[in-house]
Image (spheres, rainbow, N blue to C red):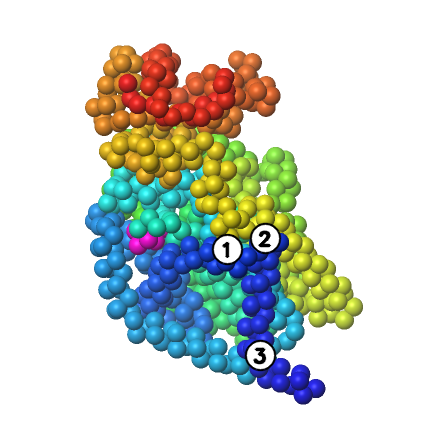
Amino acid sequence: MQALHNARSRPLTWILGFVFLGILGGSFNLFGTRFASTSLFLGFYLLLYPAAIVFLIVMLSIGIGHAALQILRLSFPRHRYEYYFSAILGLGIVSYAVLVMGLLQGYRHHWVMFAMLIGLLVVARRIATFFRLVWQWLSRQVVSPWQAGEMLLLFLVAVCVIIYFAAAMMPPVYYDVLEYHLGVPKTYIQHGGICPIPYNFFSSLPCNVEMLYVLGLLLEGGVSNGTPHLITFIFYALSGVGIFLMLLRLGLKRMWCLAGLVLFSIHPIIFKSGLDAFNDLGTSGFIIAALVAWVFWIQERRRSYFLLSGVCLGFAIATKYTAIGLYVVPYCILLLPLGLFLCGIGRRTTESPAQDVTPGIKAAGSDVAAKAQLTRFFRAYIVSLICLVGIIVLVFAPIAIKNLISTGNPVYPFLSAIFPASGWTSEQAEFLVNVHHPVPLLSSTYVATVLRRTAMPGIFFLAVPVLVLFLRKVVSIEVGLMAYGVLGFLVWNLLAESADRFLTSYIAVAVIVAMLVISEVGSWRVIGPIVLSGCALFGLAGMYVLFAKSQAFHIPQVAMAIESRSEFQKRFLGPLADAAHYANTQLESDAKLLFIYEARMYPFDRPVLVNTVFDQSPLLLMAKQVSSAQALAGLLKAEGFTHCLVNEHELKRLIQFYGPRDELRERGLEPLLESAPHHLIRYPEFYAPYFLDPEYPQHEGKLRQFLWLLRQSVIFQEGREGGPQLYIARVP
């Protein structure tokens, strides 16, 4: 008993012990029987410099965000909420500061270092206060008893964190990341500032998180290019902290909050979003912050929290357009009116007993009062909606200004009928929509799509939150959050081919509501133990899946430096990795490449011009200006191009996934899509930038002749004889 008392009196020792065991457990999972401390420390050492840079970015963001909260006169009952919102707001503000520097053509390493140093000095006192409060919090944990269940969950959280952090050591390999999440920031850095990037409409999409990538890459100076992935890890951590604080605010104990962190971390969609420098976890970070502010608005009944929620929603849209349909519109439809109602607007006031009035007069008076309150509620909703939209537009304005300068369209490529821009046609806009297979809402196809795609978020994350309807009043915070998440999921299914990464914020909302349900049902005398046992088994199964996925993605080998980053990239990128290495080491320093059928520009250090599958082809546009293949080669040289990279592997894939099925069927080529896709390279007319251009048939001969000329001057080539090839050739 005395030993148990001593253990309870030193909970910090136990906490640190369980965290260490979690790190050890995560490391054992990652490194298995080949565990070696020297390799482990070597892997972490390679991440030390970019980790230090990201740490300084976060500290700067906390300081700036804290100053912004004071300017807005926002205060919180606990410091934990104050500094959480400081980090969220600060990251958004820092990203916009980087955007302004880019518009001023200020992407120079020494300029950015100087600005970073000045910023840190300005907010140094706030950062010191933050560290002092963190130390005080740790000191309080010394006297705060921790239960065995909390220790176990802390251990699992530590395992998840070490796996996600080790995943941040991985080099970028995913297509979207290489094409624009990192490809566009790298182009900006090469140019010295933000510039128009033709034939890549992704460069005009919201870039809040990408601006943070620019800052990290500039400060890192090309040492290992590890900062973007670490910034993704920071948003994963902030999303987890937001879930933890939301559950605390809704009255749950620490154990359930830790369980929510584990449940969020083990979800495959969250793990997938954390594997590379995607911006989806950035979206979830801002959306969760908006929901925490929404809860504060209802509980404290202060409009300043509502305004803070709108700011966070604006940053979410400035990160990804999909946040509009999936999270902002449902917020306006559901959470805004619910918040007004729970704040007391629209509720019936308690009436004093009427004296000397007939029942008919009382009923008439009651109807008049009800109509007056309904009118008051509707008026408050309209005013609040206008205010919310105004805040969102104001926060999004820097992105709109950037697009207006680059393309003439503040929301490029959308609303092109109102803001026409060169290089974007109605056929391209229609193709962009049809590629994602829109589904009519009131149709059997939509119902089938919803049922088919329930496996992506998981039945548990769909069914358990709905149970809150049986535990709470219909009008409550919990039911509102459940309806908000479900509505976002239904909107996501309006596009049958939308990416599952868009659901990261939905997963967070589902976790929050699920923990509210489980914590209450788990306290029931008969059903409770069964429910808790099932949830424990589900959590252990999720941890096993997380371990398996980390092994499948070769996180252990790269984290331990058993497999080099270049070897990992070569295994995932194939011949493109070798082509990038050749171009970076063998081509002249003033070389400039034109990519044909390829858009992943990030691995290349030389200036390149690419086009996405949704944009026009620069090669075809140049072919329209000349009369022969030889003249086309001369025009390329006049434009400064020295080499061309042709990737027939990508041509095959792009036709296979984006080619016009009706035309392929008419030509009798549809069976090739599955049986022999390598033969598709003989039909470049089905490449989207070609078949969307009605003038392509007139210039097809010139393009084929030009590719034949390139074949005569190949300097690098990989691929099977008679199959798709990837080659680099000098412009003839």
* Residue at the farthest bottom position: 2
Q: Which residues are magenta?
A: 213-220
Q: In the rendered structure, does residue 312 fall within the stretch colored magenta?
A: no
How far, Cα to Cα, is label 3 from label 1? 32 Å
According to the picture, the residue beneath numbered tag 1 turns out to be: 39
Q: Nearer the viewer, residue 353 or 54?
A: 54
Q: Residues within 10 Å of mark 2 (few under 14, many from 20)?
A: few
Q: Residues within 10 Å of mark 3 (few under 14, many from 20)?
A: many
Residue type of the residue flagged with mark 3:
Pro
Residue type of the residue flagged with mark 2:
Arg
How far, Cα to Cα, is label 2 from label 3? 33 Å
According to the picture, the residue beneath numbered tag 3 turns out to be: 11
Q: Secondary structure at mark 1?
A: helix
Foreground disc of the pair 3, 1: 1
Q: Secondary structure at mark 3?
A: helix
**Camera sees residue 632:** yes
